[in-house]
Amino acid sequence: MRYRDVLTIQQQVKTTDAYTRQRVDTWETFQTIRGNIADASAGERVITDANRDVLISHNVTIPSNSRTRQITPSMRILSGGVTYNIEASTDETNRRRRLVLQVTQVINAR
C-alpha cells in the first residue's frame, strides 16, 4: 500500500509556562509518519471508552509497528492544516501490518 499523506501524531503533555510559571497543557509531536486519510462511510459510529456515541468523519490508515501501536485516543493527528481527534484504533488485517485510526475532524481547534 502506498501512503500519500504526511501525518503528525501529537500527544498532550503538561509543561511550565515561561512567563507565568503555571502548569499548562500543550501538544508535542509523538511521531511523524505517512498514511492515508479517507472519508468514513456515512453514519459510521464508534463507542468510546466514555460510552459516548461518536460519528466518525475519517479513517486514517498507517503502517503498524511497535511505535504506531502505542497510539491512543488521547492523541491527535495534524495533516494539511487539519486537526483530527483519534477516537479508536483497529488492526486492519489482524496481522499487524496496518492500523486504521477512526477519527473526528476538529472544526475549531484551539
Image (spheres, rainbow, N blue to C red):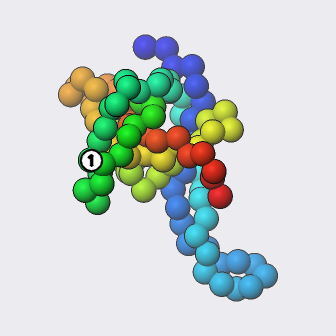
Q: Residue lying at the far front in this picture: please name it.
A: 43
- Quadrant of the frame with the C terminus: bottom right
Which residue shows up at 70% across the image and 77% down it?
17
Which residue shows up at 29% across the image and 42% down it?
46
Q: Secondary structure at mark 1?
A: strand
Hey, what amino acid is under mark 1?
A: Ile
Q: Residue lying at the far left in this picture: please name it.
A: 94
Task: Kindly tell me whether residue 61 is visible in this rendering.
Answer: no
Please tell me which residue lies in front, 77 or 64. 77
Q: Residue lying at the far right in this picture: please name it.
A: 19
Which residue shows up at 42% across the image and 56% down it?
74
The x and y percentages for residue 43 are 34, 31
In this image, 105 relative to 23: left or right? left
Task: Kindly tell me whether residue 79 is visible in this rendering.
Answer: yes
The x and y percentages for residue 89 are 33, 40
Residue assigned mark 1: 47
Vertical placement of residue 36 versus 77, above or below: above
Which residue shows up at 49% across the image and 14% down it?
2
The x and y percentages for residue 42 are 38, 26
- Quadrant of the frame with the N terminus: top left
Occupied quadrant, residue 44: top left
In this image, 30 relative to 59: left or right? right
Vertical placement of residue 13 versus 106, above or below: below
Marker count (numbered):
1
Please tell me which residue lies in front, 30 or 25. 25
Vertical placement of residue 12 versus 40, above or below: below
The x and y percentages for residue 65 are 37, 35
Q: Residue lying at the far bottom in this picture: please name it.
A: 21
Vertical placement of residue 103 versus 20, above or below: above
Badge 1 crowding class, 10 Å Cα cut-off, few under 14, some 14 to 19, many 20 or more, is few
